[in-house]
Amino acid sequence: MPSFTLSWDGNSFIPAVQPLAWHETNCDFWNEVMRRKATLTCIDGPCGTNGPQILEGVVGWNRNPTSSIGNRDGELALSRQGISLFWTTQNTVMKFEGASRWIARSLILFSECTNPVKIETHPHGAFTFLWRLFGRTGTPPKKLRQTGRNARLSLLQSFIPNLTAEMVPNHDAVDAACAALIAGLHGLDLTTAFGTPEMGGQIWMPDLKKACESADT
């Protein structure tokens, strides 16, 4: 998994020296976070579920009979905004294969290391909100197409002027840069939460109203 590091200079976001890093383990990721002395970490993946819990040793999932097995309210709220996503429900995670392994990894990341502060985002959703911020409708072109990559780079460069295509060589790196941007916007109080801690956790997105007000001032 990739990570991307940004800093704020008072006017814009600046990529760190060699901002992109690749990690084979969670430990690699947290070592990079500590090395960078990050004050906030934004993760592309769920911070919680609305039902199953990971068994000790990460060998499977436990059905909790006292928990709801419905959708996370944050994912439902994003869906109502026209954001397509992978549903983190009991039915989608219990097989512990494919996407459910990615969900497990994300949940473990959120359970590890109390510092720095960790928040969740969804890059496709974040790019869609930024797309709309600049007056476009619908959603950006698909990220695996060149038009989609160009659109996402353009959106990122509106906030990170020094970002180059070489810094983010594939779509996973672009998503990592997007997560870093959401962390930065969150630090400036320019994000809004979808969902609640009680119903699967909060997913943070750019706050279009606050962003417009900030630009006007």
Image: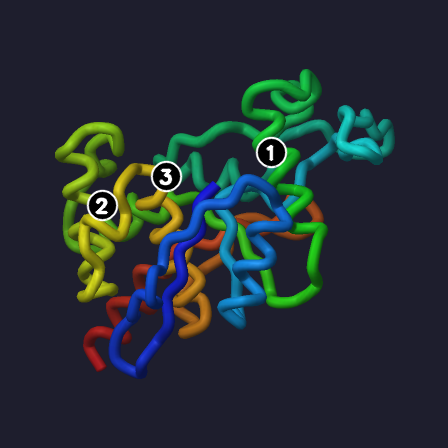
| Along the viewing direction, whichever of 29 and 159 lies nearer the viewer | 29
Instruction: Name the quarter where the C terminus is drawn.
Output: bottom left
Q: Tell me the distance, in whole angstroms, between the alpha carbons under discs 2 and 1.
A: 24 Å
Residue closest to the eye, 118 or 199? 118
Within 10 Å of the Cα at label 3, are there few (<14), some (14-19), or many (20+) other Cα atoms?
some
> Cα distance, mark 2 to mark 3?
12 Å
Residue ID at (41%, 74%): 188
Q: Secondary structure at mark 3?
A: helix
Look at label 2 and name its amino acid. Arg
Query: Residue 61 at x, y = what percent?
Result: 77, 26
Residue topped by disc 2: 152
- x and y, in percent, of residue 197 in the image: 67, 52
- Residue 172 tag number: 3
Q: Earlier in the sequence, mark 3 or mark 1?
A: 1
In this view, the mark in front (2 or 3): 3
Can you say whether 101 is above or below 13 in the image? above
Q: Quadrant of residue 63?
A: top right
Point 57% across, 32% down: residue: 102
Along the line of sight, the residue nearer the viewer: 50 or 118: 118
The x and y percentages for residue 72 are: 60, 37
Q: Which dot marks residue 103?
A: 1
Nearest-to-viewer mark from 3 and 1? 3
Give the amino acid at mark 3: Asp
